[in-house]
Image (cartoon, rainbow, N blue to C red):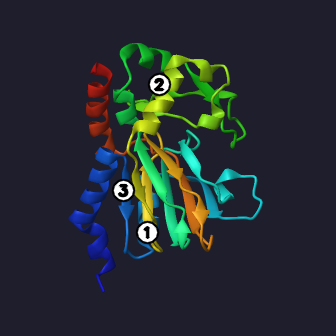
Amino acid sequence: MENREDFLMGAYFWENFSENLRKKGYQIIGGKPSWILNEILEELGPVIQITEVIVKPESKALVTSDRALDFHTDHHRARYIVWHCHKASTEGGDTLLVDAWRVWEKMSRSIREELRNIRLFEHKVFQDDEESYPLVSEDRHGCLRFYYSFWLVNKEDLREDSVRSWMNAIKEEKPIQMKLKEGDILVIDNHRILHARTAITGSKDRHLTRYWIAEKTSIPFLDVLCKRINFKLTQI
C-alpha cells in the first residue's frame, strides 16, 4: 500500500490533476483511495452544497429522477462540481460533457454580442439569488464563464437566432461520454463544462454524492492558463 504522504505529494498526481482541469475543464479520477476526495475538495475551495444523487420514484426534481438530462450547468456560484460515485446502475446513467469554450468558438462575432445580452432565469437556491443571470459573462480575471440550462431560457429568447445557434451548436458538438464506476471521482469546471446524463435504467440503484465548490480567492495553477485561453477566444 502506498504511503499516504508520498501519494499526496507525488508530483505526477497533482500535476496531472491540475493540467487536465485547466486544459480540458474536467478530470476523472478512478481507483484511488477514498480519502483523496477530501484533499481535492480542500484544494478546490469551500463546499457550498452537498446532494445525494439517488433515483427516487416519482421524483419531481430532475436530479433525483431517472430521466435523461440535457446539457446544462449548475448554479453559477458553484465554480466546480465534484461527483463521487458510490454505485452505478446496471444500465444507463452515463455522464456526458461538452466544452462551452468550443461551442463559443463556433459563434460569429455578432452572435456572441447578442448572447452576452441574454439572461436566464436564476436557479434559485440561496437566499440572495437574483431573478436572472447572464448566459455568458466574465470572472474577475476576464475569463469567460457560462450559465446555461435550456429550461431556464425565457420563452421570448428562444425565438432569437443567437439562442437557437447556441443550442444547435451544443447539439452538434460530440460529447465526452463516460460511465462512472464505484469509487470514481469526476471534477468539472462548472463555468465552462456543460454536463448531461442519459436515462437511468436497469437496476436504477445509481448513487453519487455531488459537491458544489465555490471559487477560492485564487487558484494559481488555473489562473494563468485561463487568461491565455480566454484572450485567444475573445480574439477569434
Q: Amino acid at mark 1?
A: Asp
Image quarter where the C terminus lies is top left
| Contact check, label 3 and label 2, Cβ < 8 Å | no
Q: Which mark is residue 184?
A: 1
In this image, 218 relative to 127: left or right? left
Q: Amino acid at mark 3?
A: Gln
Q: Amino acid at mark 2?
A: Ser
Judge the density around disc 2: few (<14), some (14-19), many (≥20) Cα neighbours within 10 Å: some
The residue identified by callout 3 is: 27
Q: Nearer the viewer, mark 2 or mark 1?
A: 2
| Rendered location of residue 81, percent (x, y) | 50, 52
| Rendered location of residue 178, percent (x, y) | 42, 60
| Contact check, label 2 and label 1, Cβ < 8 Å | no
Q: Residue at position x 68%, y 30% from top?
A: 130
Q: Nearer the viewer, mark 3 or mark 2?
A: 2
Q: Nearer the viewer, residue 54 or 14?
A: 54
Whole-Å distance between the Cαs marked 1 and 3? 11 Å
In the rendered view, would you say 232 is above or below 113? below
Mark 1 or mark 3: whose residue is earlier in sequence: 3
Q: Which mark is residue 165?
A: 2
Q: Which mark is residue 164?
A: none
Q: Is residue 69 visible?
A: yes
Specify the quadrant of the image occupied by residue 35.
Answer: bottom left
Mark 3 or mark 2: whose residue is earlier in sequence: 3
Q: Secondary structure at mark 2?
A: helix
